[in-house]
Structure formats: structure tokens, C-alpha cells
Amino acid sequence: MTKADQEPVPVADSHELLRDILAAVSDGIIILAEDGRILFANPAALTMHGCETIADLGVSAKDYDRRFDLRFRDGRELERKATPMARLARGESFHDVVVEVRRRGMSEPDWIHRERGLILDRQDDGPAFRILVIADATETFEAEERFESMFNANPAPALIVRLDDLRYVRVNEGFLELSGWDRDQIIGHTLYELDILAEAERRDQAKSLLKAGETIPQMEAELPLPSGATKLVLLAGHPAEMPNNEQCMIFTFADLEPRRRAEQALRQSEERFATAFRFAPVPMLLTSLEGQRILNVNHAFLALTDWGYESVVGRRPADIELFESGKVRREIEERVAEAGAFRGYELNLKTRDGSLLTCLASAETVTINGQYCILSAFQDISDRKRTELDLIAAIEGAMQDSSWLSQKIMDRLAALRTPVAPMGSAVSSVELTRREREVLILITQGKSDEAIADALGLKRNTVRNHVARLYAKIDAHSRAEAIIWARDRGHHLGSDPGHE
């Protein structure tokens, strides 16, 4: 060690060195004398007050407090005797006082300071110094305010848990509305007191990821409510660093209660449908729209056809030859594909022993357990059909034996099976479109669907649709009924529509 190293630095030189050091410090430094005079301010302190010289700060602590208005972060005004500068001038030390600083007369704060006061005792009867250390926290608090604003404005319910101690530090309005908790019942409390993961779908995985500060994937959970009940939610956790550098986990939530209620209502509705379907007195058949596979049949259907449940369910109508012919089955499928439903279609249903039953079939497209299906209902009219055939046979026999029996009398006899509705009834006031009247006239002339299509220049499917709508309007189930209905109302009169 040289002689120069052993010699103390002169006082004047040490002061200059100290000034140079303080000038390079990023924190603001203001030094007061014991009498409150401002002795020194480094460039950082001047910048944090928008000043160019020490004189702009004021000559003393009192002068400083006259030039600058200080408030707490919540907007409450700070009395002059309680400002950091006044406290320091009185010889009081303090730590981490956060204040908003604005020039006197300005409405908005210019800076946010985090300040602490230090007292340096006398050395060798020298003066005691009071040092105000200022950190500019403006950007930090502005970032927190922006985050707070965005967090509260987020419509998705959310909570923020600090990872160091697992305490809730933020909660937005969405979560308060979702859960019914008050803010004071959440903020400052720990995850152990309000355990949002206690009934999570994958609780152990979620808690392990929370401890590691890693993303918690979406999972269903039962959120505890103040009443002691729970609410079904979808939650997820996302690690994030807060503006104050705290490591946190942001939990977001979606309310699944409406879905659960809808599922319960749907399940109850489907249970009621299943019960009504099973015990309905009308024979019914449920088939899948795609693949036409039989999904279910009711007791009345099994009683009508003599089929066993296991012999029918899971198979296609073609597999058991349910209908008289493949042509009838395909026509039914086409009707459903074109219109989604049909009413009163006459067909022959085949029983287990091969005998045929004449039925009126109706079908509707429905959704069961999320699957598109066809619900078909059948009305057995075999007895009525046999009565009609017997009556027609008797009339034809009478015509052969009695030349005096007129066509009009034959029509009246045939009409006995479908009495004409009284005047003023809904049937007598049926309004047909021009096309439906044309189709009806051709039906009364005994023309087939193909002949009607040729006469009117239509496709056969279009004619079938017109016929189906016509039957529905006049409540007819066969061509014979439609002819009788038309003749009783004069629709058989007139020229052939195809030759007008």
C-alpha cells in the first residue's frame, strides 16, 4: 500500500465525489438541512418534479409543499404537515410512502412517487442530514391501473391468486355475479379458505400445476357458493406476472349451470317421451333417419304385428320385410326425405306370419338423444277396408243383376261408408288450389299418378306431393274416398285439365 493510499480524501473532494455518485443514481435524492432548507437534489429528483434547478423545487420543505400538491392513491388529500417532505424536516424517518404528485393548481397528477425518508446522524459535530429517496412509480402504477381496468371490464368471471402465498389479490365483477360472494369475502383470503379446486374434475392435476405455476387446462368443477351449495363451472388457470412483478395465476370461469339445467330438462323430456311411446295405444315405430335402422317399437306395435322386441330392434324394415313390398318401403323413405313428414298414407303392413294388415301410416322427423329419427304411427283399418270391399262387391253384384240401378244410386250407396259432412262444417268449406282441383278432377276420372303427371306436365313426385296435400285437406285416405268427396261436391264435373 502506497503512502497516497493511506492518506484520507480531502473533505471538499469527498463532497464532490458524493455529488457525482448521487447524480448518477436513478432514484431521486433530495437532501434537507436540519432547518428544512433544501441543500441538494440530483437530476433524477428534478426530472421527477418537472424542474430544471433546485430553486424550482423550492428553497425549503415548506416552500416545496406550497408548490406541489400531494395526495394518497385513493384521492384523499394529504395535509401539508403529513407530507413526506414535512415529516422529513421534523426529523422523522419512514418507508414506502406512495403519493400522487401534481403541480399546485393542476387537476391531474403528474407523477406517482414511492418515497422513503432517511436521517443521517451528526459525525464529529457536523450537521445532520435528512435524505428523501424517491422512486418514480408512475409507469408501474399506470400499468396496474390499465391491467385493473381491463381485468374488471372482462365479461368472463375471473380470480387472481398470488402464487407466493396462494392469496386472492383480484376479483372482477363477473365472478362476484357468478358466485354471489362479496369482494371482502375473497380478497386477502387464501385458496385453502375458498377452495375453487376442491371439486374440480381433475383436482390433483390442477393443484399440482398451480404449485408449479403452470397452465391449468379447462376442466369442469363445482364452484362453492356462500349458501353452501355449488354451481357447475368450466375453469382454467393461466400463469401471469402482475405489473408489480408478482407471479400469479389468473383463473377464468364459464357458467355451465344453464347447460346442466337444459340437459336435465332434455333428459326428463326424453324420459317422458319414452314412457308415452312405450305405453301409447297407437302402434309406433322409431327408426334412424340415416341407415333406416329400427331403434325402438312400442307394445301396441308388437301386439299388432306379433313380432318380438329382440327380433325387430336393431334391424332394418327390409330385413324383416315389414312392408308389403320394397316399392312401398322406398316410397315411404322418399316421402320423408322430400317433406320430412307425411300423413294418412295407406299401405299394407306385414305381420310376423306373413299376413297383411291395411294401415294408415303417418311419419314425422324427430330428434332423440341428439340423433335424427323417424317416428311412424300406424292405424289398422283392415276391418273397415273389408267392409268397404264387401259393400262395393254388393253394389257391383246389384249392377250386374239389376240394369235399373243407376250410377247415382251406386255412388250414394258407396258414400254410406263416408257420410258427407253437414253444411257449414270445416270439411264443406275446404279451399283447394287450382292445381289441387286439377289433380282431383283427374283422380275422379280414374287416372293414375303417372297419367296425371303426363296430363299436367309434372313430375311424378310432384303429383304425389299434391295428392298427399289434397288427402290431408279433405281428410281422405284413399282414391275411392277422394272420388266420393269430389262427386258429392261437384268436382268431377268439367273438362279434362290436361286438354284445356
Image (spheres, grey):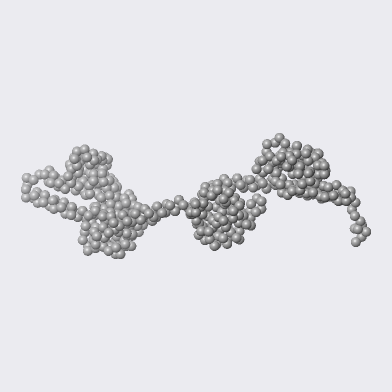
Specify whether 240 is left or right of 462: right
Q: Residue at x 15, y 52 (%)?
A: 387
Q: Quadrant of residue 275?
A: bottom left
Residue 132 in sight: no
Figure disc tally: 0
Furthest toward the top, the residue is 105
Task: Locate the N terminus by quadrant.
Answer: bottom right
x then y, percent, for residue 466 = 27, 46
x then y, percent, for residue 158 = 56, 51
x then y, percent, for residue 70 = 71, 40
Q: Quadrant of residue 191?
A: bottom right
Q: Quadrant of residue 438?
A: top left
Residue 149 in sight: yes
Q: Residue at x 62, y 46 (%)?
A: 146
- Relative to the observer, which residue lies in front, 129 or 290? 129
Q: Residue at x 31, y 50 (%)?
A: 341
Furthest toward the right, the residue is 3
Specify whether 35 is left or right of 458: right
Specify whether 360 is left or right of 259: left
- Relative to the observer, which residue lies in front, 458 or 264? 264
- Relative to the observer, which residue lies in front, 231 or 359? 231
Q: Residue at x 85, y 47 (%)?
A: 127
Specify whether 33 is left or right of 460: right
x then y, percent, for residue 47 = 76, 43
Task: Locate the C terminus by quadrant.
Answer: top left
